[in-house]
Amino acid sequence: MAGEFLSDVEAIRERARKHIEQGAVIEQYQGDPHQACDLLNTALASEIVCVLRYRHHYYMASGLHGESAAKEFLEHANDEQRHADRLAVRIKQLGGAPNLNPEGLQTRSVSQYAEGESLADMIREDLVAERVVIEVYGEMIRYFGFHDNTTRELLEELLQEEEQHAEEMSDLLFLVNPRTGEAEGVDPATRATERYISGSTLPAPKDLEKGKSPERKKVA
Ligand SMILES: [Fe+2]
Ligand SMILES: [Fe+2]
């Protein structure tokens, strides 16, 4: 019986009628909608940068494995665009506006637009960007926790796809350049990620946990 689980249904109905101009944001929303939109706009900018980077790689891929890599890049670009659209919809639901201003896009993004010179470079940059997004989405999921299930679930779905993207880039990198990193005994993706994070715009995880807007380091 619903009554055993729900609090006063009449009170819920009453509250739903109040402040209907706030759309999906109900009085009982546990989080801070402004903070949520700020974080989601960071994710949105990151997705758009990923769309642009993957599209650039799609057009520039060449060589023996160029065709198969280009196909993968295009699929990922389209996935990232879909992610961006889903984030924009959620931002609007929370009463915010998706920030699509090209000015400052790279600054708002945690992923970087790196063109790469060779096909292996391109794939490595894509893998690094995926790994950065995976870490940041993980932090955001912990931040949203139980106070915003819808946003948390959205980010969890995106995270699953980013992990799949990373795996595909990792496989592709091995196909294109199976010897990369072997001489040093270091996983090339790990090394590239460390290099990237040290000068990246990655928000400090502690700030996400405290619910503050991400403070970004200056890119070196
Ligand atoms: Fe994405
Ligand atoms: Fe991705």
Image: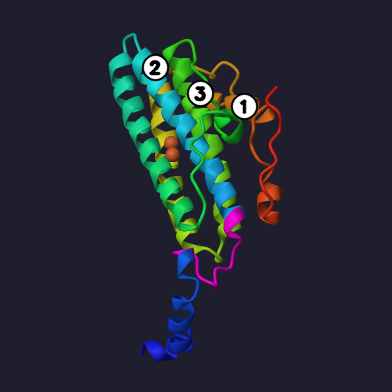
The picture quadrant for ligand 1 comes to top left
Name the element at disc 3.
helix
Secondary structure at badge 2 equals helix
Vertical comparison of 114 with 106: above or below: above
The residue wearing badge 2 is 176
Q: Which residue is mark 1?
A: 196
| Spatial separation of the CA atoms under disc 3 and disc 1 | 9 Å
Q: Which residues are magenta?
A: 22-34
Sort mark 2 into few (<14), some (14-19) or many (20+) by Cα contacts within 10 Å: some
Which dot marks residue 125? Answer: 3
Disc 3 versus disc 2: distance between alpha carbons? 14 Å
The three-letter amino acid code for the residue at tag 2 is: Val
Say whether residue 29 is magenta.
yes
In primary-sequence order, the first of circles 3 and 1 is: 3
Q: Residues within 10 Å of mark 3 (few under 14, many from 20)?
A: many
Residue at x-position 38% and y-position 24%: 172
Residue 167 place in picture, x, y as percent? 42, 35
| Quarter of the rendering containing residue 51 | top left
